[in-house]
Image (cartoon, rainbow, N blue to C red):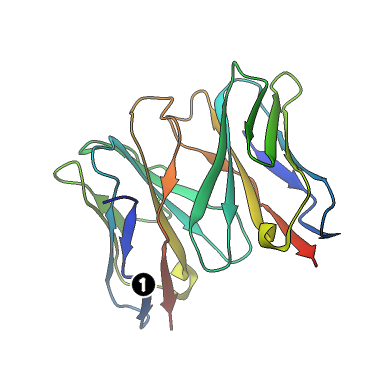
């Protein structure tokens, strides 16, 4: 596609439910990032993939958070047993190249998660 | 800890004014710096990317400068318009951070007609 696509755009979950958020990066982009953005704050890094390899997951807040990119294109961020503090916008971004200097990052519209 | 700071958090100006948004970062060892715009309820739109070897980048009415040694970048917006109202985010790619961008908290800009 022309841009980074994320689904669902909005998700309401009851506390304790599992959720899955999908990211479809720009075709051919090697690097894929997940960020979490709380209201009124800048995005916070969660995890980074280069192709199918998860090179950095240092930002995942707990072992309830899991991300995968099995074929090096579409990625899924899964949150198990959701808590109210997980409520945020989850942003996905991709870039053409990999490595420590991944170049210009392009973001999707985000998935807004509300946990009741 | 490598950090990015944006001041002020919010700014309101009359239409037509030239304005400067500030971004500072704690470590001069960077690959590049990227400015984004975020409209309410939307994702981030890339405005400008400045590599560490560059001093500035321009796109239309926007000009971004980089002073790596002092840990500062500015985004200059000429002849502001109500449509420029949004949150502007600065993000830095530091060495030893594995490619990820570290974001500031953003400056919320309001341009009044």
Question: Disc 1: which chain?
Answer: A
Q: Which residue is outermost to the left?
A: A71
Dot 1: element: loop
The residue lying at 66 percent from left, 61 percent from top is B83
Residue at x-position 53% and y-position 52%: A43
Looking at the picture, does residue B47 appear above or below residue A112?
above
* Image coordinates for residue B109, horizontal then vertical, percent: 74, 58
The one nearer the camera, B79 or A9, is B79
Residue A36 appears left or right of B69: left
- Is the residue A68 above or below the residue B74 in the image? below
Q: Where residue A17 appears, x then y in whole percent? A: 29, 77
How far across and how far down the image is residue B7, in percent?
78, 47
The residue where tag 1 is placed is: A82
- Quarter occupied by the C terminus of chain A: bottom left
Whether B95 is drawn above or below A49: the answer is: above
Name which residue lies at 31% across and 70% down.
Answer: A8
Horizontal and vertical percent position of residue B67:
73, 23
């Amino acid at each position: 596609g022309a841009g980074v696509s994320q689904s669902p755009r909005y998700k309401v979950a009851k506390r304790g439910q599992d959720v899955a958020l999908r990211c479809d990066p720009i075709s051919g982009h090697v690097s894929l990032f997940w960020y979490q953005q709380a209201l009124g704050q800048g995005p916070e890094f969660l995890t980074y993939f280069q192709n199918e390899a998860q090179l950095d997951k240092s930002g995942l807040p707990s072992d309830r958070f899991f991300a995968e990119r099995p074929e090096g294109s579409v990625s899924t961020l899964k949150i198990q047993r959701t808590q109210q503090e997980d409520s945020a916008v989850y942003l996905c971004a991709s870039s053409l190249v990999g490595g420590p200097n991944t170049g210009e990052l392009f973001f999707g519209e985000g998935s807004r998660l509300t946990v009741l | 800890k490598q950090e990015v700071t944006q001041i002020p958090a919010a700014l309101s100006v009359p239409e037509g004014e030239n304005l400067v948004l500030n971004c500072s970062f704690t470590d001069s060892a960077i690959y590049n710096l990227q400015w984004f715009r975020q409209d309410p309820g939307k994702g981030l739109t890339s405005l400008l990317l400045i590599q560490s070897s560059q001093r500035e980048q321009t796109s239309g009415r926007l000009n971004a400068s980089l002073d790596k040694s002092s840990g500062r970048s500015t985004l200059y917006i000429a002849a502001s318009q109500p449509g420029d109202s949004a949150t502007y985010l600065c993000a830095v790619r530091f060495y030893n951070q594995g490619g990820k961008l570290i974001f500031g908290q953003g400056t919320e800009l309001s341009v009044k007609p």
